[in-house]
Image (spheres, rainbow, N blue to C red):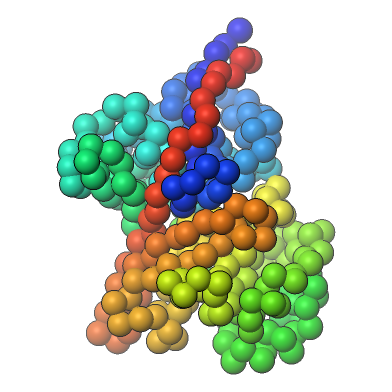
Amino acid sequence: MKVFSFHRVNVFTDKFFSGNPLVVLPDAQGLEDAEMQLIAREMGTSETTFVFPSESRDAAYKVRIFTPNAEIPFAGHPSLGTAFVLAELGRFPISEPLTLINQELKVGVLPLEIYIKDGEIDRVVMTQKETEFGAELSDFKELASALGLEAEVIKGTGLSVAIISTGIPQVFVPLPDLQTIRNLRPKFFELREQERKLGVIGCCVFTLETKDKEALAHMRFFSPAQGVREDPATGSAAGGLGAYLALRGLLPKSMEFQIEQGEEVGRPSRIFVEVKVDRAGNPYKVKVGGKVISSMEGKIFL
């Protein structure tokens, strides 16, 4: 019998029973790929992370990320939650007010910032990969139908449907208001087929009408092809949305903003995004961060 410890945290929140839950196995050496996939499926969270010694001199550790259906090369809340767990376990030294570390992912080595206040971890921030802008879709009738919408509803926003990546490609769909986004009833089989057809990992729908005045955007994220019908808080998509809005001149002058997500699944979350742009207004660096709290720990027997 093999025994592995696990930690469960909630990311993008400072409250229990909210945010996006993540399961972290801080000592995953000895696990086979098939075993990691089975554990991720058993845990039932949108992602489970497995930590290994880094193969890069530039990184403190290596992370592999699994959804219930497959391994993915990059994700936001797993990066933040894993760093939080390892810092809490003392796997690397932390000092107030800021500790900088690098993590190794399938997409390469990416930096993390861990902010410390009064001896406690206040928040974790990750820098995502350089933004890649894919196609803007001229025909999105099938995608709209998969979301349970008419294409005209999306066209009425005056914004485009676009594929963007800050680590993994995702499709971004603008909606006119909160009522529309809250009333969505996606057809998940059709949406799964759209993910595969478009070559994306997930669909982000968003509106600039928000419940909280401090937030700039309200977001939902679906990825049925990965076994995640709806994600409570999606760091990768928050970064892509930041790049999307920056390119269209829709961000505040500070280029920093907040996203609210998770209300529709009963797990309210708050994501902080910062975008840096060049002189031409093109985004070249995206940071995503938030608070993390511990919620559970235990052992897995194989």
Q: Residue 282, how many percent across, how many down?
A: 35, 80
Residue 235 in sight: yes
Q: Is residue 231 left or right of residue 128?
A: right
Residue at the image position 61 percent from the left and 15 percent from the top: 301
Q: Is residue 239 left or right of residue 156?
A: left
Occupied quadrant, residue 40: top right
Q: Residue 188, how many percent across, how many down?
A: 79, 60
Q: Is residue 279 left or right of residue 5?
A: left
Is the residue 193 above or below the residue 275 in the image?
A: above
Q: Residue 71, how many percent across, how many down?
A: 58, 42
Occupied quadrant, residue 152: bottom right
Residue at the left extreme of this rendering: 96
Given residues 193 and 256, the one toward you in this image is 256
Given residues 65 and 159, the one toward you in this image is 159
Residue at the image position 24 percent from the left and 44 percent from the top: 116
Residue at the image position 40 percent from the left and 49 percent from the top: 291
Is the residue 300 above or below the residue 13 in the image?
A: above
The N terminus, quarter of image: top right
